Amino acid sequence: MTTDAQSRRILDAVDAAFDAQLAFTQELVKHPSLRTREGSAQDLLYAAMAGRGLELDRWELDPAELAAHEGFGPVTVSYQNVTNVVGTYRPAAERGRSLILNGHVDVVPEGPVEAWSRSPWDAPIIDGWLYGRGAGDMKAGLAANLFAFDAVRAAGFEPAGRIHFQSVVEEECTGNGSLAALLRGYRADAVIIPEPEEDMLVRANVGVLWFKVRVTGSPTHPREMGSGFNAIDAAYTTMAALREVEAKWNVARTEHRYFEDLDHPINFNFGGIAGGDWPSSVPAWCEFDVRAAIYPGISAEAAWAELQDCLAGLARGGNPIHAVATRTGFFAEGYVLEPGSAAETLLERTHEQVFGTGLESFTTPGYLDGRVFTLYADTPTLVYGPVSEAIHGFDERVSVESVRRITKSIALFIASWCGLEERG
Amino acid sequence: MTTDAQSRRILDAVDAAFDAQLAFTQELVKHPSLRTREGSAQDLLYAAMAGRGLELDRWELDPAELAAHEGFGPVTVSYQNVTNVVGTYRPAAERGRSLILNGHVDVVPEGPVEAWSRSPWDAPIIDGWLYGRGAGDMKAGLAANLFAFDAVRAAGFEPAGRIHFQSVVEEECTGNGSLAALLRGYRADAVIIPEPEEDMLVRANVGVLWFKVRVTGSPTHPREMGSGFNAIDAAYTTMAALREVEAKWNVARTEHRYFEDLDHPINFNFGGIAGGDWPSSVPAWCEFDVRAAIYPGISAEAAWAELQDCLAGLARGGNPIHAVATRTGFFAEGYVLEPGSAAETLLERTHEQVFGTGLESFTTPGYLDGRVFTLYADTPTLVYGPVSEAIHGFDERVSVESVRRITKSIALFIASWCGLEERG
């Protein structure tokens, strides 16, 4: 363990560089790294890692290679120029434990800009909050990973274990970015992912499936509307049928460890809709996008089969609906962070040291790349990060002081997990 | 009136040229004259009118000029190169009554092509039906107007009254095409529009309003879905509220002459929908297209005010919905063809002569350009045309033998309405 004096030096170093850390975070937010457009933000991170003397690796994701893995999420875009960036720190002599500090660089769309109080890409700091799309989810975390490491070194130490800084893509749609890093061979004794988790540790989360449902029928002129199938109406009927599956799955929460006490852990989100060709033609088709959640331990295949059954049932009803689902992204299972790992025990200590309160863990009904390392590399993965508001919403923001403390906690974690060498 | 012998010559002439008429109709169907893309079909009609020695007029619609008229439908497209074509026949001495033979060249979108048994643009004739988008609605009618006129001349006569052949655009979205022809100065003693009306005459029809409703709110991450406004759900609630207005208006049918006996004369069609930006973001916006119908005698402004009130009410509910409507096309009132006009009396005769049965009239819950001539030029307008199936649907088709008889009926109408001169 790090001594109190060592800790003090590291914590002071976080404070000393904190303005620079915020400036870097702001610069990162100013790059609208929407899906497939992460390039310039990755350039910035690549340069930041290069400036720190890390060993650099940047590669384009290969859908064919990924598709062979059970955790793969089907891809509806081109991966040309869609790259992961990993910077590796190697100690002169590797005596400590190794660590992956992971974060995703992709952000979700900003939505209607007029609904924001200001541009989603200006990244101002106002009243203790850093604003912007991706500020919380999760550019503050990406920056925290690097600046936590900086603080250890600025305090006069070198970590004694190998560290991989991963800036991955595709966390918001498939999870293929972290999966690609795993397939690239990156492994470590623990993983930290500073997603915006309200200064808490994620104990369990859901898996997520993405799919598109296309409802079709035969249109007519509105003058004979009664005789025509209306695909927009049928889409809503289809959504209602899926809501019944959602309700059934929520009832089953009592059977799932860490989900028993949640109100509504399984959320089906209908996140997009499109249909019809002409105001005066009864719509012949309607498509909608579904994000469905599943419990850890439920395979994506089993959930998919149940969802398909639900849709097939609509074709057998009195007013048959032809609804076909296509997988469009996440096909990911949830995970549980088993309590008692050395990594978690250490984080409890560093958290308490910085926050002065015990580390709370919780279950989140959202997707996390933590599943990649937990399910497919059996690595304790600590998803643990700052307080945020309105992620995926308007005026997304992250708490500046929370970011400072999370950075400090990660810095102390690095020091104790990897061990320290005094710099010569 | 035309003598039996004259009629016989005219009817034979229709039969003699009927193969050519079908071939011309097929050629017309092969031009996908979707909105703003009517150019090549208009070229064909222009050439057909030129070949008949008509006086030609082709002009681009002027939204600014049209907008000053109460019957104008707001325009969401450019009218650049969007043209009406009118060909005028002038007798050597104008002794008979004048006539407008009107038809629209624009067609509604074909919808998903895979739902058609064959291409919507191939125009085959199979088992007595001519297939294709626009075959019934209303290229068969446009051709019938010209070939009815041909038959009169091929039989050795010249009509003694002026005739304007109008091929107009915008009938499927605003009605601005016929309105532009009216504003251009074209007037006559009667109008025939051979829309696909099942060998019947339209006695009354509805007005139509087009508008887009945008529903907005504040999105979130699905993990906190309960707290987020879902615009796709709210759109459905908004549609349900509009359906209540529709139901109320349908109850009022007993107060509207010619609508008392209809089951559901007022149809609101939700013909298009789009919303949401990301499957894993609760949708912040959803837009849908509405086609609403109103009774003759109800002003578009009054109906619009009631629809606006309905939407405003949603903002005052327990779960307030912000729904804003924008006019996107038709802002058109319905009309009644008053019985007893000389034109109708004549059509009854020519119809019976050809079909051997009495002319039936009916009320249609669809928009018709007839309103332009009826409401704004006080001209008896006979919307009367062939048997069709699946207009605005898949495998749209028009009955070949019905087209033949309608053409004959129109030819006899021309002869008696305009009067005949034997050709020298």
Image: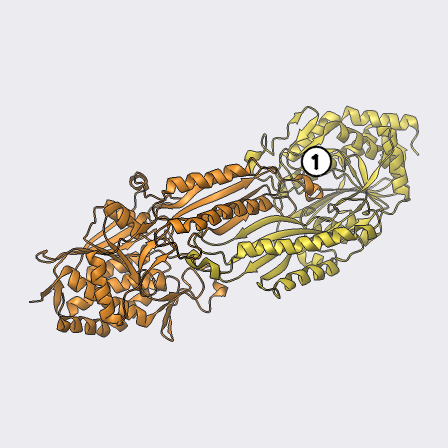
Chain colours: A yellow, B orange
Is residue A424 at all visible to an observer of this figure?
A: no
Q: Chain of mark 1?
A: A
Does B41 sit above or below residue A122? below
Q: Nearer the viewer, residue A343 or A358?
A: A358
Query: Residue B63 location in percent, x, y?
Result: 32, 42
Residue B417 lies left or right of residue B246; in this view the side is left
Position of the C terminus of chain A, as image quadrant, is: top right
Q: Position of residue B98 (x, y in %)?
A: 16, 55
| Viewer-closest of A54 and A367 | A367
- Examine the rendering and report whether any part of residue A291 can be seen: yes
**Is residue B6 found left or right of A118 in the rendered image?**
left
Query: Which of the 4 quarters of the picture holds residue B261?
Result: bottom left
The quadrant where residue B411 appears:
bottom left
Instruction: Count how many numbered circles sit on residues in the image.
Output: 1
Q: Residue furthest bottom?
A: B127
Q: Residues within 10 Å of mark 1 (few under 14, many from 20)?
A: many
Question: Residue A350 or B265: which is nearer the viewer?
Answer: B265
**Looking at the image, is B130 positioned above or below residue B268?**
below
Q: Position of residue B230 (x, y in %)?
A: 61, 43
Q: Amino acid at mark 1?
A: Gly
Q: Report the residue marked by disc 1.
A: A136
- The local secondary structure at tag 1 comes to helix
The spot of residue B205 in percent (x, y) is 35, 53
Quadrant placement of the N terminus of chain A: top right
Q: Which quadrant would residue B132 be assigned to in this image? A: bottom left
Vertical placement of residue B212 versus B201, above or below: above
